[in-house]
Image (spheres, rainbow, N blue to C red):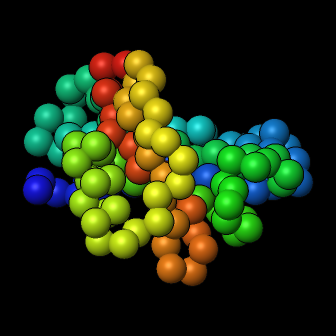
Amino acid sequence: MKKRVTGIGGIFFKSEEPKTLRDWYSRHLGIGMTFEWIDPDNPDAKVHAQTVWSPFKGDTDYFAPSTKQYMLNYRVENLVELLEVLRTEGVTIVGDMQEFSYGKFGWIMDPEGNKIELWEPKDEGF
């Protein structure tokens, strides 16, 4: 099997006022919704990869069945194969894999009840 995780695709967390919080971070820290990846060997090249930073409404059920305040999204290679390997290793798979123009998504739970989103990106989908 190739690499499992290749990077952080997103940082998601619950917030009482997501828009207000996004505005605060933008104004005071210069953080937008995405961080673009830069190739240090070719800094002028068009960047396809990115990491998303996003607060969600406090009552979101997107993190379920986790009751935690946050969820990490990891970029992976070959999600179908990885989910099968994780299943055979006894990892809890949550729901069914979904596919969109920008990639495939799957979800697992860690031993402490944190839901983890796995993303096989199609960077050209952006």
Q: Residue at x 79, y 48 (%)?
A: 60
Residue 61 drawn at (x, y percent)? 76, 49
Identify the image quadrant of residue 89. Answer: bottom left
Residue 113 drawn at (x, y percent)? 60, 74
Q: Residue at x 69, y 47 (%)?
A: 62
Q: Residue at x 30, y 45 (%)?
A: 79
Quarter containing the N terminus: bottom left
Decide if residue 25 is in sight here.
no
Quarter containing the C terminus: top left
Foreground residue among 79 and 101: 79
Relative side of 79 to 101, left or right: left
Relative side of 110 to 29, left or right: left
Identify the image quadrant of residue 7. Answer: bottom left
Foreground residue among 90 and 64: 90
Relative side of 9 to 94, left or right: left
Decide if residue 91 is in sight here.
yes
Residue 34 drawn at (x, y percent)? 51, 38
Foreground residue among 4 and 96: 96
Foreground residue among 120 and 65: 65
Residue 101 drawn at (x, y percent)? 41, 19
Relative side of 96 to 82, left or right: right
In this rendering, is residue 74 above or below 115?
A: above
- The count of marks equals 0
